[in-house]
Image (cartoon, helix red, strand yellow):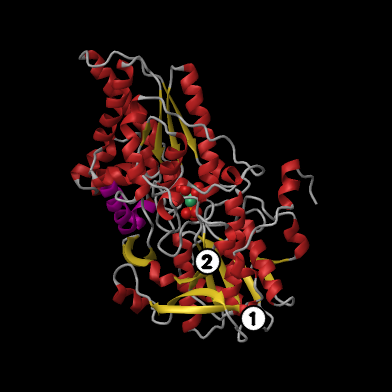
């Protein structure tokens, strides 16, 4: 084993807690099926695309005799898909321990490098010894991850061949909304082809946007928000000490603003921008900047030329004019793919795009800083998303705000000093040591996936609920993947995809922030949550996110 830090060595010894029901022998865990399910929207279209798996019931595990679970040796394989999220290794640990408990002859394999490993048939066996140094650790380095989307008929065929050739009975896909959409497609494909391979999804993403009534949160959100909260809290204290800078901090989270909202609760900075609100209010970029300027001016009048602003990574996509531009570009980049490939230079590519865009959008595009323009016309990720983590929205806002404040100064409407520092906290939050919550949650998700497999289920997501309670009280079961789907436009086509959960403006978490906003803007009510703790009182080491507490627990507005 490699040399370990003190904390690494201690964390390896941590014993994740399981929900009481999952501690029972497999023969005493009975699946209870609910009513048939539908989809979030367009059920007829989705049913047509998923004739085999559509409409399956939600399943809950309870105590009861279950002599018919699969006792034959199972060969299961796991793939880590998409962005890293703390706790992925514990999903694998839960899978391994669950498989061995069901039948010591069961075997677990890990596909290497994400879904590409399935297509190319690259995997390794996960043994007790190999797993030993990864238990309770962050990262996906055990088997690595990747963003390949299995989409062409050839890729589906190769995936099927890999599963059949290696006699894999089950595939566990650990991923976000896009990867779990892929899991649903694979489950359907295997079933239609008569390939005896079950597919189970596990909800992963630091973005926290893979959630619904049955999936309370995705793993990694708890750890990432706690890491960012420590860093933002430290900046709040620095700001309050030096009293001379405005810090603009962009936080990761591709689309939804859940991360920013949670960090806003934990640290109480002066401004917490929420993308979904900007969309709802149909704010232009200029109006967003104007709302920032108002707070800067107000604080300057109180002699405070400092403050902290949180900017969600996905903000740019929520500004209606930019949203329209991106949507048009998405279709246009597909339509003119061939022509664009022929054009060499970036400048020339931009010139071409200006010409094919309608005049209003073309002007908007030209008005954006060069780097942002470039990101908007560069390749999308394999799932058709703009790579917002590369777009420096915080710099764009500062640049525009500086101009506005300068103009206001000339008119005598502002007399303060504005010195801004920008940050992006993104990748730092994805691979830290998982919190106790993520450590336990992931282990339970993995273990529960084995119970789903042992009960012959396919096309389901592993679901662990009641998360604001102690792990022993958590509920376990499975949710059909098609139940979480709607139709969205991707790369110029209508596709059935798992719906992203955005921040709900009439939900308790957003309302709680909105109620504090005015006070936070003017007064300095910063909170300093400090680093993640692993030893100490349960109120500290086991605290769930405020988002989860507002949504599921007893926390009131
Ligand atoms: P997943 O949805 O795959 O979990 O990824 C989330 C995320 O961390 C986003 O917050 C971020 O925008 C994106 O991944 C960055 O992608 P990449 O790792 O490919 O740069």
181 lies left or right of 332 = right
Q: Is residue 239 above or below residue 278?
A: above
User: Pointers 2 and 1 in contact (CB under 8 A)?
Assistant: no
* Residue 172 coordinates in the image, percent (x, y): 57, 69
Q: Which quarter of the image is occupied by the C terminus?
A: top left
Q: Which residue is mark 2?
A: 475
* Magenta stretch holds residue 359: no
* Residue 502 coordinates in the image, percent (x, y): 36, 53
Q: Residues within 10 Å of mark 1 (few under 14, many from 20)?
A: some
Q: Is residue 151 above or below residue 9?
A: below
* Magenta stretch holds residue 333: yes
Look at the image and tell me whether residue 177 can be seen: yes
The residue nearer to you, when weighing 406 against 244, is 244
| Boundaries of the magenta span | 323-341
Q: Which residue is mark 1?
A: 27
Q: Residue at x 32, y 23 (%)?
A: 296
Q: Residues within 10 Å of mark 2 (few under 14, many from 20)?
A: many
């Amino acid at each position: 084993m490699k040399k370990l830090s003190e904390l690494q060595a201690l964390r390896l010894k941590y014993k994740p807690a399981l929900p009481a029901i999952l501690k029972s022998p497999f023969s005493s865990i009975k699946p209870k099926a609910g009513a048939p399910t539908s989809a979030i929207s367009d059920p007829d279209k989705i049913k047509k695309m998923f004739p085999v798996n559509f409409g399956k019931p939600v399943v809950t595990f309870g105590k009861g005799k279950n002599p018919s679970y699969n006792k034959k040796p199972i060969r299961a394989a796991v793939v880590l898909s998409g962005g890293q999220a703390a706790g992925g290794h514990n999903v694998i640990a839960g899978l391994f321990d669950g498989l061995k408990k069901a039948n010591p002859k069961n075997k677990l394999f890990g596909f290497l490098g994400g879904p590409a490993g399935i297509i190319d048939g690259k995997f390794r066996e996960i043994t007790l010894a190999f797993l030993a140094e990864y238990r309770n650790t962050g990262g996906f380095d055990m088997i690595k991850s990747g963003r390949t989307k299995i989409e062409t008929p050839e890729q589906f065929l190769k995936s099927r061949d890999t599963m059949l050739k290696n006699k894999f009975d089950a595939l566990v896909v650990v991923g976000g909304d896009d990867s779990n959409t892929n899991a649903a497609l694979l489950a359907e494909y295997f079933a239609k082809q008569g390939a005896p391979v079950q597919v189970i999804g596990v909800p992963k993403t630091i973005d926290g946007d893979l959630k619904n009534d049955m999936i309370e949160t995705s793993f990694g959100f708890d750890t990432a928000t706690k890491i960012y909260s420590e860093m933002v809290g430290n900046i709040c204290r620095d700001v309050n000490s030096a009293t001379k800078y405005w810090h603009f901090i962009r936080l990761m989270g591709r689309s939804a603003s859940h991360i920013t909202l949670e960090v806003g609760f934990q640290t109480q900075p002066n401004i917490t921008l929420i993308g979904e609100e900007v969309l709802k209010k149909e704010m232009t970029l200029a109006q967003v900047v104007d709302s920032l300027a108002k707070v800067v001016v107000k604080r300057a009048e109180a002699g405070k030329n400092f403050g902290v602003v949180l900017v969600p990574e996905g903000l740019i996509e929520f500004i209606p004019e930019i949203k329209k531009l991106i949507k048009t570009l998405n279709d246009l980049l597909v339509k003119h793919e061939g022509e664009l490939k022929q054009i060499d230079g970036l400048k020339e590519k931009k010139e071409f795009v200006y010409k094919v865009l309608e005049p209003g959008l073309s002007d908007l595009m030209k008005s954006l800083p060069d780097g942002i323009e470039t990101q908007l016309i560069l390749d999308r990720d394999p799932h058709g998303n703009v790579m917002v983590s590369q777009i420096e929205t915080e710099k764009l806002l500062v640049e525009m705000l500086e101009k506005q404040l300068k103009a206001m100064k000339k008119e005598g409407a502002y007399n303060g000093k504005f010195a801004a520092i920008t940050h992006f906290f993104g990748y730092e939050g994805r691979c830290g040591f998982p919190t106790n919550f993520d450590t336990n949650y992931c282990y339970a998700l993995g273990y529960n996936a084995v119970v789903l497999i042992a009960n012959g289920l396919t096309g389901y997501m592993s679901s662990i609920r009641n998360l604001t309670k102690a792990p022993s009280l958590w509920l376990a079961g499975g949710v059909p993947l098609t139940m979480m789907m709607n139709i969205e436009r991707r790369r110029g086509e209508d596709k059935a995809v798992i719906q992203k959960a955005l921040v709900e403006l009439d939900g308790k978490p957003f309302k709680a922030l909105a109620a504090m906003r005015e006070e936070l803007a003017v007064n300095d009510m910063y909170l300093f949550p400090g680093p993640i703790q692993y030893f100490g009182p349960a109120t500290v080491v086991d605290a769930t996110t405020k988002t989860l507490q507002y949504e599921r627990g007893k926390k009131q507005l």
